Amino acid sequence: LISSIQVLNEFSGWETWANFPHERIKLLDLLHAYNNENILIISGDIHKAEISQLNYKDQIFRDITSSGLDARTYPKSINNHRIGKTLEEKNYGILEIQDNGKLTVRATIYNEKGKAKLTTKLGE
């Protein structure tokens, strides 16, 4: 799933699906009902990068957030679902998708110098 704003973070100080709590629950319920695997959400617009994870019902939902290289960075904010650290540098993300009989997706966030800083993988 791709969203312009974070889905899992319940407070970013900015725009997030949590600002629309009924719609957020409806989205999570729809994702749960129509998916039998784990969910990777790609999001942005927080002027930093981080990975969030929510165990929703019996599924793992993971949200990897990156902001454009031209975005001014902001300090990290509260995120009860963050796993690992926040990258408070200009950044960009790359998705690697493989299908060797089972679909796997690796999402990696790089700083502006091209150094891998955050990574997550689903489908192993």
Image: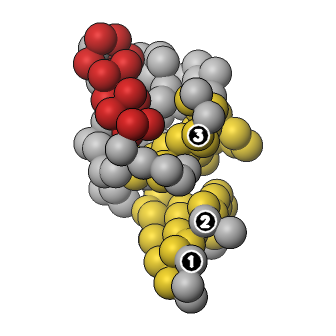
Question: What residue is rendered at 46% in x and 71% in y?
Answer: 95
Image position, residue 4 (x, y; %): 26, 42
Asked which quadrant contains residue 19, the reply is top left
Rounded to the nearest whole Å, what is the CA distance between mark 3 and mark 1? Answer: 17 Å
Q: Which residue is mark 1?
A: 102
39, 119: nearer the viewer: 39
Circle 2/circle 1 CB separation < 8 Å: yes
Q: Which residue is mark 2?
A: 123
Q: Secondary structure at mark 1?
A: loop
N-terminal-most mark, 2 or 1: 1
103 is higher (above) or lower (below) than 69: below
Question: What residue is rendered at 42% in x and 48% in y?
Answer: 35
Name the kind of residue labelled 2 in the image: Gly
Asked which quadrant contains residue 114, the reply is bottom right
Image position, residue 40 (x, y; %): 48, 52
Name the kind of residue labelled 1 in the image: Lys
Image position, residue 64 (x, y; %): 50, 49
User: Which mark identifies residue 59?
Assistant: 3
Name the kind of residue labelled 3 in the image: Gln
